[in-house]
Amino acid sequence: MKRLILFSLLAATTMALPVAAQSGAEQRELIGQVGSRSALLVLNSSREKDGTWRVTGEYLLLPTLVRRFVEGERSPQLGLTALREGATPIFFGRPPTATLRGTWRDGVFKGNRLGPGGQERETFEFSEAFPSLDAYSAQLRCEAGDDRYSSSLAYTIEKGRLVPGSFEWRTRVSPSGHACAIGSTDRVEQQTLAGALQWRAGVHTDACKITLRDLGEHVRVAAENCSAYCGSQAYFEPMLVDRRNACRILRPQTR
């Protein structure tokens, strides 16, 4: 299947930072470009008493998997947004490496990436509209990992629909040996989500969710709220699946 190379993150494990449990808090994923490079932007926003949105998050560049963290503010009326950028999620006492300055409204965040001195380095544009996976078909069985973490993933999808009983995802963390496992006999149901394929494992409304997003050259597979399927030190690291059905762990780098 031919897909637009737009890019995309982030996680979960996802690469996303946790959203604070407070009124008005929300998390958004956006796909787009920073200069000529495709990127996934994951932003967590919470509304302050004056109506301003406090924004934190990160973006990930492919294929290098370089990770950059952002934090800043968004105005409630015009969507004017300024996000300071850094190599770590801790900004206190550290000068930003750049600033993303622009407007974020109607699901689109666009503007200029500025250097520390305010000089324009490149433009950027992100959108909450991901490419559809309604036509996606694949018969996958793959393994990926290193000496600290291993993962095996399998599924069969026919024109955007998961074949019942075909989904399996198993991981193991060393040296503890703790593991996660969603097996072919576990209940996995397809959900409706625009610009993605999503499945729910379990029967509760807050059950484990598996989400596939089209990143252009890859499909990202990420898990959310799946601790019930894992040992205390185990987790599901997001996976990237390429057009040849080869897998790699989506483990971002900072530099």
Image (cartoon, rainbow, N blue to C red):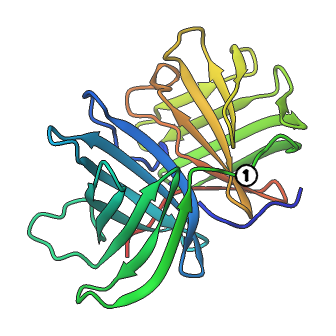
Q: Three-letter amino acid code at disc 1?
A: Pro
Measured as percent of width and height from the top left, residue 122 is found at: 46, 84
Residue 57 in view here: yes
The residue located at (57%, 50%) in the rendering is 128
Picture coordinates of residue 65 (x, y %)? 52, 68
97 displayed left or right of 231: left
| Residue 21 versus residue 100 in the image, above or below | above
Per the image, the residue denoted by label 1 is 131
User: Residue at 60% across / 13% down in the picture?
Assistant: 202
Q: Position of residue 153 (x, y in %)?
A: 71, 40
User: Who's the residue at 81% across and 60% down the image?
Assistant: 3
Left of 124 or right of it: where is 186?
A: right
Local secondary structure at mark 1: loop
Seen from the viewer's position, the closer of residues 42 and 48 is 48
Which residue is nearer to you in this view: 95 or 207?
95
Q: x, y percentage for residue 22?
A: 25, 28
Residue at the far top: name it: 203
**Other residues around mark 1 within 10 Å, as few (<14) / some (14–19) / many (≥20):** some
- Visible residue check, residue 9: no
Residue 236 appears left or right of 164: left
